[in-house]
Amino acid sequence: MATQEALDADSAADANRTLKAAHRAMWALGDYHTFATSTVWGLGPVLVDTCRISRGQRVLDVAAGTGNVAIRAALTGAAVVASDLTPENFEAGRGAARAAGVEVEWIEGDAEALPFEQDEFDVVTSCFGAMFAPDQQKVANELLRVCRAGGTIGMINFTPEGRGGDFFRLLAPYAPPPPPGALPPVLWGNEEHVRKLFGQQVESLEMTRREYIERAASPHAYLDLFKRTFGPMVAIYASLTDQPERAAALDRDFLEFIERSNRGTPGGPIQIPYEYLLVVARKRGEPPVGRQQLVSGR
C-alpha cells in the first residue's frame, strides 16, 4: 500500500502537470509573435550586447517566445538553443529566424526543469520569460545548473515599481488566482530578491534599471493589440464571455492605465515607458580548458 507521503508526492506532481499545461495553453493563445514584435522586440539586442555574446559560444535562451533574444544571438555567430514551455510559438520563431538568415535550435522546455545537461552553455539568457514560472528559486537553480563555470546569465525583468508592475496588478482581479506559494513575477525585478535567488553561486552580479517605450497609434489600438495577441489577456477575456459587465470594466481599467502612463503628445500616438531590471551574473568558477580564450576574448 502506498504511503501517505508517496500519495502526497503524486498529488503534487499531478497538480504541477496540470498547472504547466494551463500555462502552455494560455501562452499559446492570441498571436505572441505579433505582440512581441510590436512591444519588446527591440530588447533582444540589448541582452545580446550586455552579455557580450559572440561567435563560437553556445547560448541558451530560456522562455524564448518566438526568438527575440535567440535570433539576435545567432546573428553574432553563436550556436543558439531557444527553449520554451509553449512550442506552439516555434513556427513563428523559425520563420523569423529564416528571415534573419540564421539557424536556431528550438526545444520545448520548462524553466523550472530545463532539459539540458549541467554546465552545457556559455551564456544563458531570458527576456521577460523565465520570470513568469511560479517557483522562482527552481528557475534560478536551473539557470545556474545549465550555465558552465565562469559563464554568463543575463535577464531582463519588469520591476515591481514600474509600469510592468502596474500592468500585472491591473490584471490580478480578473485573472485566476496564482498557484499556492507562487511569488509575483515582478519580484525578479527587485535587486535584493535576485541576489537571494542566485546566492553564493555567482561571483559577480550587475543589475541596472533601464526603460523602454511601447508605442501605439491610440489608446484603443493599444488595448486591441493586447486583447487580440497577448495570451494571458486573451484567456482572461475568454473567461469573461458570460460576464460582459466585468469585461467592460477591464476595458475601462486598461484604458485608465494607458491614460495615466502615456508620455506621448496629447491626442497623438501613445508612448508608455516600462522600467526593467537588466541582470548580468557570472557563475562562480573557472571555465573548462579550451573555453578560457572565449571568455577573455569577448
Image (spheres, helix red, strand yellow):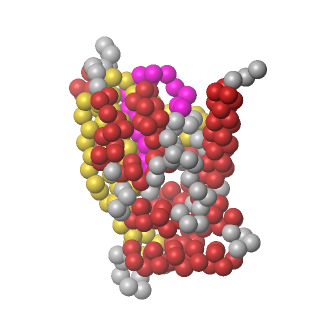
The span shown in magenta is 113-128
The foreground one among 50 and 74 is 50
Residue 55, position as x, y percentages in the image = 36, 31
Residue found 46% across the figure and 31% down from its top: 142
The foreground one among 14 and 109 is 14
Residue 124 belongs to the span the image colors magenta: yes
Residue found 29% across the figure and 56% down from its top: 210
Q: In what quadrant of the picture does the N terminus appear? A: top right
Residue found 62% across the figure and 42% down from its top: 20
- Asked if 71 appears above or below 203 in the picture, the reply is below
The foreground one among 137 and 44 is 137
Residue 272, position as x, y percentages in the image = 39, 70
Left or right placement of residue 129 versus residue 57 in this view: right
Q: Quadrant of residue 33?
A: bottom right
- Asked if 284 appears above or below 270 in the picture, the reply is above
* Farthest bottom residue in view: 267
* Count of numbered tags: 0
- Residue 74 visible (yes or no): no
Residue 113, position as x, y percentages in the image = 54, 32
Residue 163 belongs to the span the image colors magenta: no
Q: In what quadrant of the picture does the C terminus appear? A: top left
* Farthest right residue in view: 1
Residue found 36% across the figure and 67% down from its top: 273
- Residue 148 visible (yes or no): yes
Residue 266, position as x, y percentages in the image = 38, 85
Left or right placement of residue 256 versus residue 281 in this view: right
The foreground one among 242 and 126 is 242
Left or right placement of residue 44 versus residue 200 in this view: right
